[in-house]
Each structure stands twice: as structure tokens, then as C-alpha cells.
Image: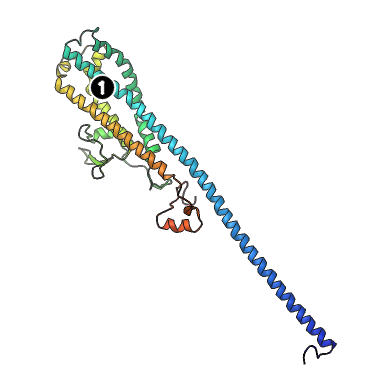
Amino acid sequence: MSIIDQGPEGRATGGREHWFKSLLLSAQGDYSFLKSLTLLSAFGTLIGAYFQNLSAYENKVTAQAQTDMTAATQTLTETSTALAAPFRLQWQLIYDYHNAIAAGTDADPKDYNTADAREIYKFYARAYADLSQNYNLLARKAELYIDLPSDLTRDPNPDGTPLSVEIDMSVLNAYGFDCEKNMPSFDHHESKIVLTEPKTGKTIPVDWYSSKHHLLAMETCFEITHEAMTPVLQWAAGSAVDPARRAAFQQKTFDAFHTRATNQVLRQNAFMSLAMFDIDKIRIKYRPNGFLCSTPGVSQLLSLAGKCAPVKTRGPLG
């Protein structure tokens, strides 16, 4: 019997069933809508959080880039300035002494070369003292602000410990660094040299792709030249010159000093070339990766392929 054929009671029961089914369908529709709305809201929240985190990261990277570039540029300027004066004055004293001996006027205080050297000596003594006091600091600053930031593979939070043998001027001397033979080279087959300590047989590497090592090599050769030019310094200071040392200062000795001075210029040029190269590497490291690297999901896939690699600003959880 159909609902139409039923009595009043049957029609009432059928109406309630129809109402209940309509209510269930309506509730199900409302629930589906709310569920979709909730999922959409959650997805929107995740997208918002992603771009908020990306913005914070980019701000941090921008600040770090500015800090690193400024520190590297200032370090290059500071070290170049600190080396320029003592190197130039050292060579000028040697040149004046050579000319005075060649002219036989080194005992005449009124001779141009003698008078010039005695004036230069005051500035040289001060420049030598400043460099001797600060050379180690300059080398460490070059390592901290040029070498490390330009290393694209470096972990900013290493778990290692300092090297057992830290290269400095005394170590280079002990391991027989040769200022004439051990010249800088950026050929990858010759960019590292190995020095051996004669007594113990221990070895240390000198890396010409390290600004720190360049500075230590230059300062080592500067100090060796300073020790060898004792008669020049005695003459320039107006003191008595050891006759034996004066007699030994012939053309051969001057040629050796001239070679050393030329090598120092080459070392300075190599250091500045490397420092500028490393500063450019720092700039490239912080260069924006592009739109795809900022797209959720795509950036992670590209990272697996070695692209869109993030700049490490903190430890593993950062």
C-alpha cells in the first residue's frame, strides 16, 4: 500500500521519515561544507606560515649577507693598509743604502740617500712595531671574515676542535718556509704545498686559497728581511755599522733583497686577488635563488637535486 493509500497514521509516519531523511541529507551537506572549509582554512594557515617563515629567513639572510660583505671588505682594506707602509719603507731603506754605498757617500750625513734614510727610519720603526704586534690578529681576521664566509660548503656549527698545529710565523720558520721558492699559485695542482719539520718529520700544509696563509707568508718574509738588513738599519739610525757587514753588502746581497722585495709585491697582488675572489663568492652565496625556490614543495624537490640550497644561518634545527 502506498503512502497515499494509507490512513492518517501511515501518512504521519511517512512524513516523519521523509523529514528525518531530509534533515540527515542537509546535515551531511553542512558537515561536508564545514569539513572542506576547515581543510581549506588549515591549508591556508600552512601556506601563510610557510611564507611568513620564508620572509623571516630572507630577512635573516639579508642581514647576514650585509654583515659578511662589510666585514670581508673592511678586513681586506685593513690588512692591505697595514702591510703597504712597512713593506714600502723597508725596501726604500735598502735601496737608499745600496745607492749610498755605490756612491761611497754612506758616511756623509748630508748625502741625499743618508738624509732620506734617516727620515724614513723613524716611520719604518713605528710601522715595523705595529705590524709585529698585530700580524697574528690580522691573519686570524682574514680567516674569520674572508676564508670562512667564502667557504660554500662550511657548516656554521661544526662539531670539530681546533687544529693541533695552527700555522703562524714561528711555525713557518720552524718548518723551513722558503721566501724565494714557496711562491703563491692558484693552479689547483700547485695551490697547496707541504712543509716538513726537519727534526720531527711532522708536516703542515700551506694553502694558497687561504687569505690567512697568504698573510702569514708575507709577514714571515718581511721579518726574515728585517733580520737580514741589520747594517741597513744601523746606518739609517745613525749608528755605527759593522765593517764586516758593510763589506758583505755588495751587489749580490742587494740583488737578493731586490728579489725578496719583488716577491713581496707578487704576494700582495696574489693576496688581494684571492680576497676579491672570495668576497665575490660571498656575494654569490647570498644571491636570491628565484621564484621556484620560494614555492612550497618545488623548493624541496630542487634541493634534493642540489639546487635551491638554503644558506645556513643556524644549526640543524634552524
Residue visible at 36% across and 36% down in the picture? 276
Image location (x, y in percent) of residue 124: 31, 19
Q: Which residue is mark 1?
A: 91
Identify the residue at horizontal 44%, vertical 35% (top origin).
70
For the point 29% across and 24% down, the residue is 87
Please tell me in which quadrant of the rendered image residue 127 appears: top left
In the displayed structure, 199 sits above or below 49; it is above
The part of the image, by quadrant, that contains residue 69 is top left
Q: Is residue 122 left or right of residue 234?
A: right
In the displayed structure image, the side of residue 315 where residue 39 appears, left or right: right
Tag 1: amino acid: Trp
Of residues 212 and 284, the one drawn nearer to the viewer in this rendering: 284
The quadrant the N terminus occupies is bottom right
Q: Position of residue 66 (x, y in %)?
A: 47, 38
Residue 132 in view in this figure? no
On screen, residue 33 above or below 14: above
Q: Nearer the viewer, residue 116 or 231?
A: 116
- Taking the image as shown, residue 171 lies to the left or right of residue 283, namely left
Pick the residue in front: 298 or 89. Answer: 298
Q: Picture coordinates of residue 286 (x, y %)?
A: 44, 44
Q: How is the image coloured?
A: rainbow
Is 22 rendered above or below residue 218?
below
Is residue 76 visible to us here?
yes
